[in-house]
Amino acid sequence: MDRVSAAAQQSLRALGVRPSAALYLSEPIRGAIDRAILPVASPWLRMAPRGDGHGVLVLPGLLASDASTKPLRSFLRGRGYYVRGWRLGRNLGPTEAIMEGMPGGLRDLAERTGGPVSVIGWSLGGIYARYLALEHSAHVRQVVTLGSPFGVAYGHRTHADATFGRLAGLHARSSRVPDRSHLADPVPVPATSVYSRLDGVVAWRACLGDLGPTHQNVEVRCSHLGFGYDPATLWVVADRLSRPVGDWTPFAPPRLLRPFYGDLSVPAGD
């Protein structure tokens, strides 16, 4: 069996496979540890790349609100960005209020800051971020997703599927909701997918996008609940947001930080 077919076989075997019970059940404690590490890492995070003041919209994960992204937003404000949460309350999935409110919030932030906005989405928030890039690309500068399972378009599963299903009665009519088969479509702006093999909620392969001239998959080593606090993840976000428009290059961590990252070149289907 050649290498290509072996990779395809591995991807097929991974379809429908969720993270192990050990990873899933340990998420709360591992997430707490990730959060506790953030203050310790603050001194070296102050050396992360600074920005140009452009607007940044941060979208929370399923059942979360802007409170969950406050540390991430605070860090990015410290790097010089005009940062805003989504201001839509708790993320209950694609409700009418959310599907109507996100584009409006994106346009408002773009107008306020005088240019396209970088959109960062955590888990389900990252799927929303890609949706905004596909449907409102004129207002989106780039997308960074954190543990976002857009690979469910290919049949991957997550430990959040049942919760999402229970909320389906609250969701907008099907014509307002992105078709599941298009969730993994390439976006027309630079995109970085941050994922972790230690993710206990989302299968890490579900977070991989097809590699391209302006798309990269970056592996960190945190829990699903820790993406918004993990120092290595925050450094990636700061680095990506600091890239000038039209001058996107793949993320390459400083040599001393390289041990905090895994593979930086894993393609979808690996």
Image: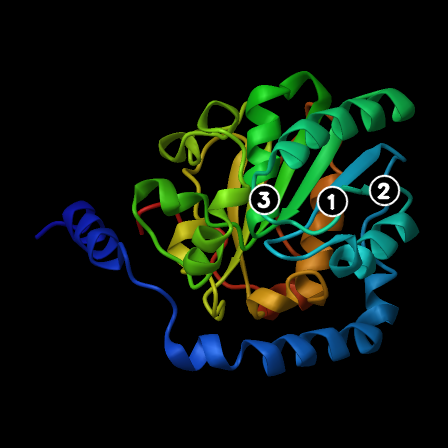
Q: On the image, numbered disc 2 is attached to which residue?
A: 83
On residue 113, the disc is none
Find out whether the residues at labels 2 and 1 contact each other: C-beta distance under 8 Å: yes
Which picture quadrant has residue 222? Answer: bottom right
Q: Can residue 268 be seen by looking at this rendering? A: yes
Q: Residue at x 84, y 50 (%)?
A: 76
- Position of 243 with respect to 39 (left or right) is left
Q: Secondary structure at mark 1?
A: strand
Q: Position of residue 95 (x, y in %)?
A: 59, 38
Specify the amino acid type for callout 2. Answer: Val
Mark 1, Cα crowd under 10 Å, few <14 / some 14-19 / many 20+, is many
160 vs 257, nearest the viewer: 160
Q: Secondary structure at mark 2?
A: strand
Q: Position of residue 262 (x, y in %)?
A: 50, 63
Q: Position of residue 224 (x, y in %)?
A: 56, 65
Q: On the image, numbered disc 3 is attached to which residue?
A: 126
Which circle's residue, 2 or 1, is located before the other in the chain?
A: 1
Q: CA distance from mark 1 to mark 3?
A: 9 Å
Q: Can residue 189 be seen by looking at this rendering? A: no
227 up-or-down from 56: above or below:
below
